[in-house]
Image (tube, helix red, strand yellow):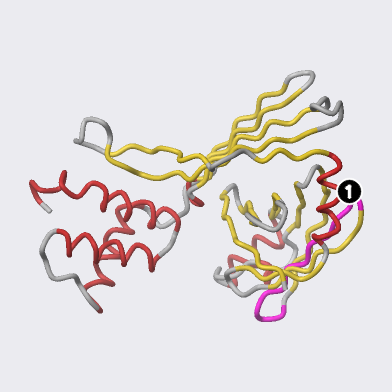
Amino acid sequence: MGTRSQQFQTEIGTIYDAITKGDERAAKDAMHKLYEKAGRKPPEGESLEKLYKDVLSVHGAEPQETERVEIKRPDYSVDLILARAAGKMKVEVSGQNGPDGKPFRTLFEGDVVTRPDPSGKGLELVANPASAPLTMTTEQAQMLREKLNGTWTDEKGNTWEISGGGNSITLTESYQNGHKVVYNGQYNLAKVTGEHIINDPLDMEGLPEQVSQQVASNFKTPYRIALDFANGEGNCLAVLVSYHLFLIPLVGD
């Protein structure tokens, strides 16, 4: 865009966010809008593919690592998570003595986006908070636990079978090739955490066979999951793989 780049900072920020999330379609759509706003013919076909790959190479193809800060106090804890690859910011406050005298967990969430900074000469990251925080009590969590068991489908088309009872929970992910990955975990105040130790090359999709075999045989890398469950809305599965966080919307069958 040459000397006109400051006129398109919003569009550039949108492209940056899409690339950061690994959303190729959204990135290409944003590139189209940028060219249209600039009064130029949007690239198509091979030209668009080359432009996308050029931008990706500058940005970096690997997802940005999740940043996490944990603050612990005798009666409460605060967990701050910046999941840049998912475009999310979370602040979780939990304690043993809520308004009803029982354990509680309150979650503040926001979407992290890139926008023009106040000077108009650069870009900055901001978190747009959700309309209201989510507070989960012991009673609410127990009611929601009954709704978790069953079959779910993620945006990749993989299915998740959730089973168990009380604080014990098992999540079984079925890849489209039929391979299954089992996560054994715990349920606490509508938050599910679990872990699967990679022990089969088929656990890792998209990696060269030799690399997958080395990881499964020698490193025993864990896949970790954390799921926040709300009453019929906002369900998402957060999968932490090699310190990267990906948010996957879930739809119950």
Query: Which residue is most to the top?
Result: 74
Q: In this view, does 10 lie above or below 233?
A: above
- Using the image, determine if residue 123 lies above or below residue 99: below
* Position of residue 85 in the picture relative to residue 168 (left or right): left
Nearer to me, 64 or 110: 110
In the image, what residue occupies the spot 65% across and 73% down? 158
Q: Where residue 46 sits: x, y (%)?
A: 24, 77
Q: Locate the N terminus by quadrant.
A: bottom left
Q: Name the residue under label 1.
A: 167
Question: Where does residue 114 sit, x and y in percent of width and height?
Answer: 35, 44
156 above or below 120?
A: below
Residue 50 percent coordinates (x, y): 25, 70
| Residue 37 visible to the viewer | yes
Q: Does 218 lie within the magenta span?
A: no
Residue 226, visible in the rendered structure = no
Magenta span:
166-178
Q: Residues within 10 Å of mark 1 (few under 14, many from 20)?
A: some
Determine whether the residue tagged by mark 1 lies in a helix, strand or loop. Answer: loop
What is the residue that sits farthest to the left in this orientation? Answer: 3
Q: Three-letter amino acid code at disc 1? A: Asn
Q: Is residue 42 left or right of residue 216?
A: left
Q: Residue at x 63, y 66 (%)?
A: 204
Whether the magenta-drawn stretch holds residue 170 is answered as yes
For the point 75% across and 40% down, which residue is it? 136
In this orientation, which residue lies closer to the viewer: 173 or 5? 5
Displayed quadrant of residue 205:
bottom right
Residue at image point 68% right, 69% down: 201
